[in-house]
Image (cartoon, rainbow, N blue to C red):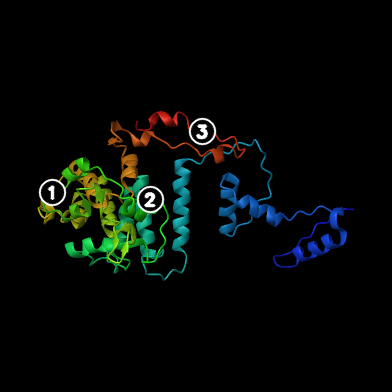
Amino acid sequence: MKDIILAGIQASGKGTQAQKLLEKYGNQIAYFETGNILRALMSNENVIGNYLRETVNSGRLVKDEIIKPEQKVERSTLEDTYKYILELINKAYTYDNKETSPFFINPINLKAIEAKVRLYMRDYTGALAAADAVVTSEAYKKVDPKEKDYLAMWQTVATVPEDVFTIVKSDNDNLSANALNTLYGSYKGTIDLTFIQPLFAAGDYRAKLFDTKESRTLKYEGTPTAKAVSNIHVIRLSEVYLIKAEAAAQLANVADAQAALLYTAKRNPAITAVADLPSTKEDLLKFIAEERIRELFTEGNRLYDLRRTEATATIAGKANFKPYNSVFPIPASEINAGFMTQQNDDWASNLPK
């Protein structure tokens, strides 16, 4: 029996004809379907599986180059990673996207994502321009929530003015064990009040969003009709203003930094005008770092702020911990995938103990 290769476009009948051959010749032939092999490889949570899923889902062809089992796969540099992220963002700008809802990617929240990426890259000119495009847009230039609306936005599944990019929930959602609503709303994840409380001035209504008796946040309590179910604010307008303020301060543009910073800072009743804010670059940056804690606590930014600014903190009781020096271990599935991936050197020694 000779080798038989069936080739053709999708849905041309290759599988059907292969089954007919099997019915006729039975165990006289061995049958391999490359599509099944590819799908099996795609289901693996390792380097090959991740590569195949990303390639196929993006509509590209999978290369037929042979990767040797012991071929070393080099890691991408941080610069290459940021470059790739910006390429994806720039590609998204080319689409005819008329979406306006913050529950989906739209042209405005794409700018917010770009602003955040460029802030992390320390491209302050780019971050400032992207953030400014958001806050001056028709959708957001008049937004200025008062205390009642600000506190209420944490207990709703409806759109609120602060929404820039939001994960929408509904009262009948089934929450996973690792969902933010579950971690903070049901498991009642704790926060360090000895650290965060002194940062709030008397009368700052944002302090009403943590429970001082149980040392936990109230941002994920849920709606009045559904415990622990409320929208997840991935990027809020407040964060975009803080990005603009920090980028402007880094560029020594004090006036623009103060103007942007006032949007969140006036939630402290002692601050009513830019004259109440710091007036030097250094003092502004220090204030902004603390303002990001006051405004964004338990929203998933703190660790990354420490890393990107190379700041120290007390974590798990360890003083002067340097998050920017720590890395997580590479999962065993990646190490064992056969690409000679090397474990991060001495990763365990930099964890807080």
Q: Residues within 10 Å of mark 2 (few under 14, many from 20)?
A: some
> Where 45 falls versus 165 (above or below)?
above
Residue positioned 42% across, 55% down in the render:
176
Q: Is residue 318 left or right of residue 36?
A: left
| Residue 306 figure quarter | top left
Query: How far apart, in angstroms, are the residues tagged by discs 2 and 3?
Result: 27 Å
Q: CA distance from mark 2 to mark 1?
A: 31 Å
Coordinates of residue 14 in the picture (x, y in percent): 76, 64
In this figure, which residue is indicated by the disc labeled 2? 117
Rendered location of residue 191, percent (x, y): 26, 45
The secondary structure type at the circle numbered 3 is loop
* Residue matched to label 3: 343
Q: Residue furthest right?
A: 1
Q: Is residue 325 above or below residue 243?
A: above
Q: Is residue 3 shown left or right of residue 74? A: right
Sort mark 1 into few (<14), some (14-19) or many (20+) by Cα contacts within 10 Å.
Answer: some
- In the drawing, what numbered circle is on residue 201? 1
Q: Is residue 185 left or right of residue 272?
A: right
User: Closer to the camera, 147 or 187?
Assistant: 187
For the C terminus, the image quarter is top left
